[in-house]
Image: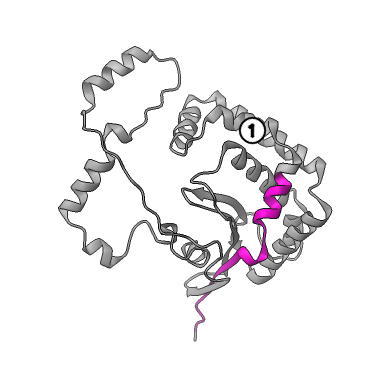
Amino acid sequence: MFNHLRALYHSHPIRDDIAGTVKSIAEITPQHLYRCYNTFYNLNNMALVIAGNADKDEILAICDEMLKKSAPVEVTRVFPEEPDSVKERYIEEKLSVAAPLFQFGFKEKVRASYRTEKDIAAMEVLLDVFSSDSSRLFRELLDEGLVNEASFSHEYFEGEGYAAVFWNGESKDPKRVASLILKEAERFKTEGIPHDAFERSKKALYGSNVSALNSPSNIANAMMALNFKDREFFKYIDAFIELKIEDLQEKLESIFIEDMSALSVITPIEED
């Protein structure tokens, strides 16, 4: 995955392992840690989500008593300019693995800090239609013995200033997997997204999100995750109802572009 991000991105920090390097960790001082703590771990940068049978005033009274007040801190996040193009189309590394591993995907040209609730819903439905267990692509990959059900997966990976669509898993021929994904993308562009598959995936994902409302814990987690990306949980659920097949087609045309794709492969170390 990290090799793939380094292939997709020229300068955005998402290409760097969040754990850092031996060199960068060795340079950390107590002053660095205090500066980080005082900047980010204060009430001005905090969100609290409560879900369930709770008394709002009672909770706020506890917060006022227990939480340390802090002076306002304005955090300015500065990102280097990221070109639209991918840095490398192919990257490979040898490691101690039993079978080749791959991650293939498309880099999205990002024009805003974060995607909207509708953007996220559209991509989730598109990926479900495109490569879920019931998709034509998945059956073709299985029939050729190129992937297995346990490892093959897809993901819309996005955050501030970056977004990409991934497929990953084990495969005896990662390049063939990538070529079939590209071929399927072109077929969808030419023939259009199947309307019955669109309706089925949209209803299934909407139902899955609605059923999650049975759990206050799920509600709280989802609201918190979306809050920090300027998104609203119930607006996200409603987006599935409002989706049109044209929304998916637009995502397909603008993101699933061969020149914006990259393949990362980990191959087994050959023993003498």
- Dividing the picture into quarters, in which one does residue 41 lie? top left
Please give left or right for residue 246 compared with residue 154 in the image.
Answer: right
Residue 172 visible here: no
Residue 100 visible here: yes
Q: Percent position (x, y) of residue 149?
A: 65, 55
Residue in view at x 39 percent, y 60 percent: 17
Badge count: 1
| Residue 8 on the magenta span | no
- Dividing the picture into quarters, in which one does residue 101 lie? bottom right
Residue in view at x 55 percent, y 70 percent: 265
Is residue 123 or residue 85 the one in the foreground? 85
Q: Percent position (x, y) of residue 182?
A: 71, 63
Please give left or right for residue 189 compared with residue 74 in the image.
Answer: right
| Residue 269 on the magenta span | yes
Task: Give the color scheme: rainbow, by chain, secondary structure or one colour.
Answer: one colour
Is residue 12 or residue 153 the one in the foreground? 12
**Image vertical order of residue 115 relative to residue 86, above or below:** above
Q: Residues within 10 Å of mark 1 (few under 14, many from 20)?
A: some
- Dividing the picture into quarters, in which one does residue 260 lie? bottom right
Q: Percent position (x, y) of residue 228?
A: 43, 37
* Magenta stretch, residue numbers: 248-271
Q: Residue furthest bottom?
A: 272
Q: Percent position (x, y) of residue 246?
A: 75, 43
Q: Amino acid at mark 1?
A: Ala
> Circle 1 — which element?
helix
**Image vertical order of residue 51 relative to residue 5, above or below:** above
Residue in view at x 21 percent, y 31 percent: 70
Residue in view at x 47 percent, y 73 percent: 95
Q: Which residue is mark 1?
A: 239
